[in-house]
Image (cartoon, grey):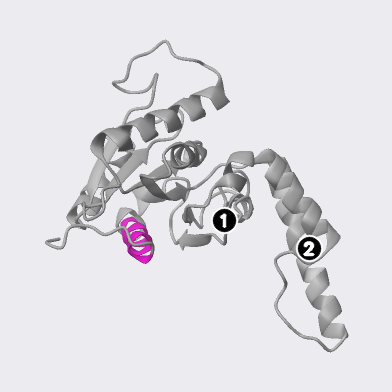
Amino acid sequence: MGEGRVSLIVLLHTIGGVRKDYAALTPRLVGAGYRVAVLDGRDHGSSSAGWSSNFEVSKANIGHDAAALVRHLGGPAVVIGHSDTPDSAVVAALEAPEAVRAVVAISPRVWENELDAWRSFVLSSYAAATKRHRAGRVGAPRRSGGTAAADAKSVLTDRTALRSRLTAPVRVVVGTKNPPYHNSPEAAAAYALGFMQPTGIVLVADAGYNPHIEQPEVVADSIVSFLKEVGLRGSARA
């Protein structure tokens, strides 16, 4: 779908945000030759009110709306979410896989059980590497080494069933100044572990919860680089 067409970038603000949150990022992505669509989610900004107040339903609805927008404007596309809405981007990619070819998660929010699972994964991987070293078989920690790591993966898969089904490539972008919970680099690693395929993480120096606002040029460059890696090209004239 849309082969040969300039790729589309759809930007989703977090729950409680507005499309103007991407005011600094949007022109940089347009300047790189991409079509860019930024929307106010239901009950946000200029969009109509009176939709569901349930948090999870709201995230799902934003994803459904993003998929509909991509189909209307035409792919191929990447959907980008911030904090609460990276999973909305995943919903869009699962709903319209023929058009949504990639997902970017900016400062993805995770919950304490996901962080606990990630810590178990790290500790068990370290223990497995130490055991191999002592046995004279030095090597990097294996992704699935150890029972605790398998248990951690199970916890994350249960908590993030949508992510575990996604086959499209994903890039996680997070500021290094985020506090050590929910949206931190550690949280980004926990979020990335929820996907079946390897997921790259970009750390943005001197940025916190809103790297796309604090360091828009760095974030734009990381997004454009990722899109080129996965074959989503902008206009040749850019």
Identity of the residue furthest to the top in this view? 50
Residue shown at the point (51%, 36%) measured from the top left: 84
The verdict on residue 223 being magenta is yes
Between residues 211 and 26, which one lies in front from this camera angle?
26
Give the residue pinned by disc 2.
123
Q: Is residue 21 above or below residue 107?
A: above
Q: Residue furthest left?
A: 237
Q: Can residue 25 be seen by looking at this rendering?
A: no
Q: Main secondary structure of the magenta part?
A: helix
- Say which amino acid is labelled 2: Leu
- 40 shown above or below 174: above
Is 199 drawn above or below residue 93 in the view shown? below
Mark 1: few/some/many CA within 10 Å (<14, 14-19, 20+): many
Q: Residue at x 44, y 33 (%)?
A: 63
SS at circle 2? helix
Label 1 belongs to which residue? Answer: 185
Query: Is residue 11 located in the magenta-colored stretch of the structure?
Result: no
Quadrant including the C terminus = bottom left
* 10 Å crowding of disc 2: few (<14), some (14-19), many (20+): some
Question: Residue 76 versus residue 83: which sits nearer the camera?
Answer: 76
Taking depth in this image into account, of 195 and 75 the one nearest to the observer is 75
Residue 169 rendering spot, x and y as whole percentages: 47, 56
Q: Which residues are magenta?
A: 220-229
Element on which disc 1 rests: helix
Q: Viewed as shown, does residue 5 lie left or right of 39?
A: left
What whole-number distance in Å separates the C-alpha atoms at marks 1 and 2? 17 Å
Mark 1 vs 2, N-terminal side: 2
* Amino acid residing under circle 1: Pro
Residue under the point 58% across and 54% down: 192
Residue 175 left/right relative to 8: right
Residue depicted at 77% across the width and 70% down the height: 126
